[in-house]
């Protein structure tokens, strides 16, 4: 009987330890090897023998938040039975709206740290269709995806990404073109296809140790803007996941602009709009799940911007921006020179 | 008092059994038409499912065949005197619908080495689960009740049972558990090869999304490619997206061969290395071909429906007849003609190809100097390799 008690105590202690370990899995620390689901993020860690040291949060930093693309949101796939959705099975669970793979290649005892890869993917769906799916007015996940989506995938390597246009096209059955649909440069090298109806953008770019893919339907321009936002996040990542571009020295009306979030996207300086506040610029934000408008004002001058759009309104008419505006941590990042000049500031970039 | 002693004895017995390194008892499954499986988590022998399996592990067997249930006693603290499988239940996975159930076999104990024959498996493709519960008669030798009766149940750890048409073929030999879960669900109730092939082809087209710019087949030559199947399945399960035509063809090949369909391979519309032909005494290079209007996966309205410009296309064939199965596309969106055993020439070819676009390419600069279009579907129709190829399938991560 005493032995039984001891056994029971030992078993309960072990169970408690396992439950505590499960409860402690967070997005800001490297989880144990295996598959976990935390707040809608499915994390798979293969780092049994080697690890890059990246956490899920390090990869999540690279993407817009689930609610940051106006009119879109993320969805957790649901198992609804074979009759309703024959493409989704219970055994596929856990489902998530975002998937993070850490230390891919690290399950082998001969793995080398420099050969490991980390990856994050997320897919946004049009808000109304996502709501209809969750309300079961749309039955299957495949039917949900036919109404459009934005799929983003970022692969992070420990050494320079070896992918390039020639190799990519050699293995692609579809035709890809160099560059971007807008002609704006993106990363070290970029290429894209537009699908038969010119409404499905498949855009890839390489920058240093990263390889990024964005698939966007039915709004190719939105997909390209999302891709630019990822390049921005790569460049300002606090852990330096890619080589940082030289931070441009920018002065507005002769005064230097100081911000850790100021960088250049292929030569175009971008920064969050908060850097303009010390220069007498007021910010008015109008945001809902469908739009994200910001009006900047300085004296009589103003400029109205919209998230993920390349056009801005000014008293002088529409202004075509050098880069699309995109969100970062609750505010919008803008092409600094054009926006500052529209507000009557003198800009110097070195 | 007597009841308390019995309970104590059983608890003590159970605790001893729990301490053992291996399970104290297992229920081996046997049968003449069972096939080996692999988990598909890694490469190497560690990936193989133990064979023959025990109840709780996945089982793959031919349709209509019979399985037998046995018991294996592993504990050194006690001895098995007999066993009595009171219930053995085979249910359809997903719905839980009972396919058959063995009733109570009577009051006689089976000898420890006796096997318990089960009813025949369905005579068609099925994805089922199998579990059992019953009693074990155990000799412990402990005073005052040296013999105890212990109930068992595997209802919470059932076996996945994959009922297939025949032995799985390469590249699914041994078949992957993760592939069989799809193929046996999608081809459920199919009793012959043609029906099973049609079902998995159409269902993959129905639920899988074609995308440009992401694929899981790599390292192509005209006679080889490596298919990162685990990565493809993971992506499909997360996003509903399969990849490009190579991935659809390779995945379809795996689905079909996992069910035991024979003589299957994949093939491309033409060679990737030999893309030139002389025209008017000059060497022209095939740049790409323009398709007729296609219903690209998934079924119904999808992002890529319409006329495509593809540098090649890959599909699944039956090697002897040259017939084609293609879950990536269906023809003529308004009629939705499925490619399920379609003659490669002329039907499939003529439905697929609208025109070939050739160019004269400067060998040094790579610049295209001249372009011509040829609208005869047979102008550059050179299925490659001629007998088809079987991709190398791997569970490794894409480097």
Image (tube, coloured by chain):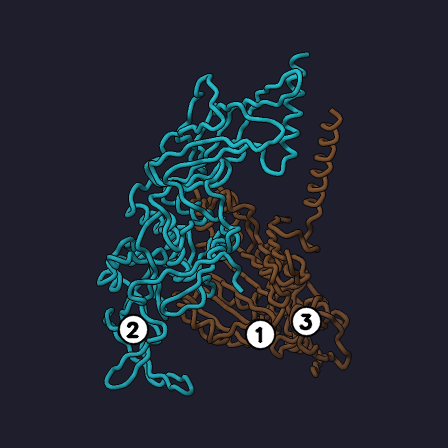
The label on residue A271 is: 3
Q: Quadrant of residue B348?
A: bottom left
Would residue A275 be seen by someone viewing this image from the given angle? yes
Q: Which mark's residue is nearer the viewer, 3 or 2?
A: 2
B153 horizontally vs B140: left or right: left
Q: Where does the image place residue B273, in percent across and percent down from the top left?
A: 36, 74
Locate the N terminus of chain B and report the quarter of the image it occupies: top right
Q: CA distance from mark 1 to mark 2?
A: 34 Å
Residue in the picture at 65% in, 20% down = B142
Q: Residues within 10 Å of mark 2 (few under 14, many from 20)?
A: many
Mark 2, residue position: B356
Q: Where does the image place residue B207, in percent across and percent down from the top left?
A: 41, 50
Q: CA distance from mark 1 to mark 3?
A: 17 Å
Would residue A319 be seen by someone viewing this image from the given angle? no
Local SS, label 2: strand
Chain containing mark 2: B
Q: Are marks 3 and 2 on the same chain?
A: no
Is tag 1's residue or tag 3's residue first in the polypeptide sequence?
A: 1
Confirm or deny contact between disc 1 and disc 3 (CB under 8 A): no
Q: State whether residue B177 is above or below residue B221.
A: above
Mark 1, residue position: A187
Q: State whether residue A77 is above or below residue B132.
A: below
- Of B56 and B374, nearer the camera is B56
Chain containing mark 1: A
Hue used for the chain lettered B: cyan
């Amino acid at each position: 009987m005493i032995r039984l008690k001891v056994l029971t105590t030992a078993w309960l202690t072990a169970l408690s330890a396992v439950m505590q370990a499960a409860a402690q899995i967070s997005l800001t620390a490297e989880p144990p090897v295996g598959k976990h689901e935390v707040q809608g993020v499915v994390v798979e860690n293969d780092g049994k023998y080697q690890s890059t040291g990246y956490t899920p949060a390090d990869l999540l930093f690279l993407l817009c938040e689930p609610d940051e693309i106006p009119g879109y949101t993320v969805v957790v796939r649901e198992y609804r039975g074979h009759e309703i959705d024959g493409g989704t099975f219970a055994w596929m669970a856990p489902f998530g709206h975002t998937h993070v793979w850490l230390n891919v290649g690290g399950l082998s005892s001969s793995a080398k740290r420099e050969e490991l890869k980390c990856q994050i993917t997320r897919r946004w769906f049009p808000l109304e269709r996502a709501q209809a799916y969750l309300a079961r007015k749309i039955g299957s996940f495949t039917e949900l995806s036919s109404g459009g989506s934005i799929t983003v995938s970022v692969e992070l390597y420990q050494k320079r990404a070896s992918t390039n246009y020639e190799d990519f096209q050699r293995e692609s059955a579809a035709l890809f073109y160099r560059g971007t649909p807008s002609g704006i440069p993106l990363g070290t090298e970029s290429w894209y296809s537009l699908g038969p109806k010119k409404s499905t953008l498949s855009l890839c770019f390489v920058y240093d140790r990263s390889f990024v893919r964005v698939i966007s339907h039915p709004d190719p321009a939105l997909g390209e803007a999302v891709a630019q936002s990822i390049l921005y996040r790569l460049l300002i990542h606090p852990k330096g996941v890619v080589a940082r571009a030289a931070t441009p020295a920018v002065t507005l009306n002769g005064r230097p602009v100081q911000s850790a979030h100021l960088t250049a996207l292929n030569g175009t300086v971008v920064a969050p709009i908060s850097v303009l506040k010390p220069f007498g610029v007021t910010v008015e934000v109008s945001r809902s799940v469908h739009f994200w408008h910001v009006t900047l004002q300085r004296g009589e001058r103003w400029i109205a911007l919209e998230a993920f759009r390349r056009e801005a309104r000014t008293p002088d008419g529409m202004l075509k921006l050098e880069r699309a505006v995109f969100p970062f941590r609750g505010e919008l990042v803008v092409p600094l020179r054009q926006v500052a000049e529209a507000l009557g500031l003198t800009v110097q970039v070195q | 008092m007597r009841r308390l002693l019995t309970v104590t004895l059983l608890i003590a017995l159970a605790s001893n059994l729990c301490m053992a390194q291996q399970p104290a008892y297992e229920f081996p499954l046997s049968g003449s038409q069972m096939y080996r499986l692999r988990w598909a988590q890694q490469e190497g022998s560690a990936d193989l499912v133990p064979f023959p399996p025990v109840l709780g592990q996945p089982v793959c067997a031919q349709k209509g065949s019979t399985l037998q249930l046995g018991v294996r006693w592993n504990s050194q603290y006690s001895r098995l005197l007999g066993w009595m499988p009171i219930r053995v239940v085979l249910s359809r996975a997903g719905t839980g619908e009972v396919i058959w159930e063995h009733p109570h076999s009577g009051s006689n104990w089976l000898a420890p080495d006796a096997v318990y024959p089960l009813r025949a498996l369905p005579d068609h493709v099925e994805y089922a689960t199998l579990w059992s519960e019953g009693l074990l008669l155990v000799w412990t030798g402990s005073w005052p009740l040296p013999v105890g009766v212990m109930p068992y149940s595997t209802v919470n750890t059932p076996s996945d049972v994959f009922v297939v048409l025949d032995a799985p073929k390469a590249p699914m030999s041994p078949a992957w558990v993760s592939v069989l879960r799809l193929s046996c669900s999608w081809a459920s109730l199919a009793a012959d090869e043609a029906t099973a092939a049609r079902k998995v082809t159409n269902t993959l087209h129905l639920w899988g999304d074609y995308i440009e710019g992401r694929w899981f087949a790599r390292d192509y030559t005209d006679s080889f490619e490596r298919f990162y199947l685990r990565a493809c399945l993971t992506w499909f399960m997360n996003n509903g997206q399969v990849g490009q035509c190579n991935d659809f063809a390779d995945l379809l090949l795996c689905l079909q061969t996992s069910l035991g369909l024979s003589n299957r391979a994949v093939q491309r519309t033409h060679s990737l290395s030999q893309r030139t032909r002389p025209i008017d005494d000059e060497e022209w290079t095939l740049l790409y071909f323009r398709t007729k209007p296609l219903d690209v996966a998934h079924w119904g309205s999808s992002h890529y429906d319409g006329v495509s410009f593809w540098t090649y296309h890959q599909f699944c064939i039956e090697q002897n007849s040259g017939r084609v199965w293609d879950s990536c596309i269906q023809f003529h969106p308004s009629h939705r003609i499925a490619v399920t055993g379609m003659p490669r020439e002329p039907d499939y070819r003529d439905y697929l190809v609208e025109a070939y676009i050739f160019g004269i390419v400067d060998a040094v600069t790579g610049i295209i100097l001249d372009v011509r279009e040829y609208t005869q579907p047979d102008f550059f129709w050179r299925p490659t390799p001629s007998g088809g190829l079987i991709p190398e399938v791997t569970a490794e991560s894409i480097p």
